[in-house]
Amino acid sequence: MKIAGVILAGGQSSRYGQPKMFELFAGQPLYKSSLIALEKNQLEPLIIATNASLQPRFVEEKVQWIIEKQPHQGPLFALHNIMTACPDVEWFFVVASDMPYMNADFIQKMLGYIDDCYDAIVPKQALRLQPLAALYRRTALPKTYQLIKQNKRSMKVLLEQLRVCYVPFEEKNPTFININAQQDWSQTDKKESDYE
């Protein structure tokens, strides 16, 4: 069974003001936390889904690139593109590029829930779902296509139509901290000077 590790890195970073995935955190670009966590679990292929204007700023060589033809369409659209581009992959571990505390132990724990009776495996903190740190099975592809045709872009709406295993996590778990705006760095302790 093939399980791909996917980083979603095509967002506009509109609230942040510049491409946040290249900001330095603990001495490396922010997206690296997610990439290393996926890599440590031997997921392959490792995929970075981004757009043509951002791709030259990544330094990775051992990854597969999925370049959005229509940028900034959101994660559901990106998930559909990724699944379509990788017909031989059964499961996709999808992680956002702006999660400084993404780690290999979390990925390993989530992989333990893989089962044929699910289309998705999603972390849940109290009432909050974390669809951008989750596993999606190829069986979800027809639903993604259907929603895109209906011009729906919500990951929540997708999950409502899938067989989902929700994995509970504590509300204070730092794994799910993500950086949407400059002030979000106050939740972390290793932010460094702006990426040049």
Image (tube, helix red, strand yellow):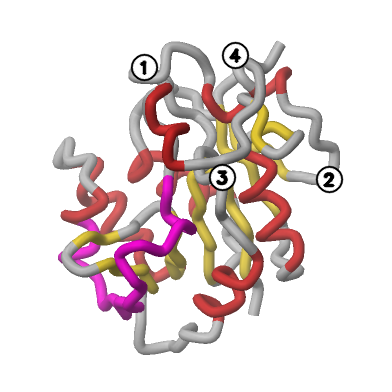
Q: Position of residue 41 (x, y in %)?
A: 71, 70
Q: Which residue is mark 4?
A: 53
Residue 190 position by quadrant? top right
Circles 1 and 4 in contact, beta carbons < 8 Å: no
Q: Tell which circle, 3 or 4, labels the residue nearer the N-terminal end.
A: 4
As shown in the figure, which amino acid type bears the numbered disc 1? Ser
As shown in the figure, which amino acid type bears the numbered disc 2? Lys
Q: Quadrant of the N terminus?
A: bottom right
Q: Position of residue 107 (x, y in %)?
A: 58, 69
Q: Which residue is mark 2?
A: 62
Q: Is 154 on the left or on the right of 48, as rendered? A: left
Q: Which mark is residue 14?
A: 1
Label 1 vs label 4: CA separation?
15 Å
Toward the viewer: 130 or 157?
130
* Residue depth check, mark 3 versus mark 4: number of the one nearer the observer: 3
Residue 97 position by quadrant? top right
Residue 162 position by quadrant? bottom left
What residue span does the magenta drawing correspond to?
158-177
Q: Is residue 165 above or below residue 27?
A: below
Q: Tell which circle, 2 or 1, labels the residue nearer the N-terminal end.
A: 1
Q: Position of residue 86 (x, y in %)?
A: 60, 55
Q: Which residue is mark 3?
A: 100
Q: Secondary structure at mark 3?
A: loop
* Residue depth check, mark 1 versus mark 4: number of the one nearer the observer: 1
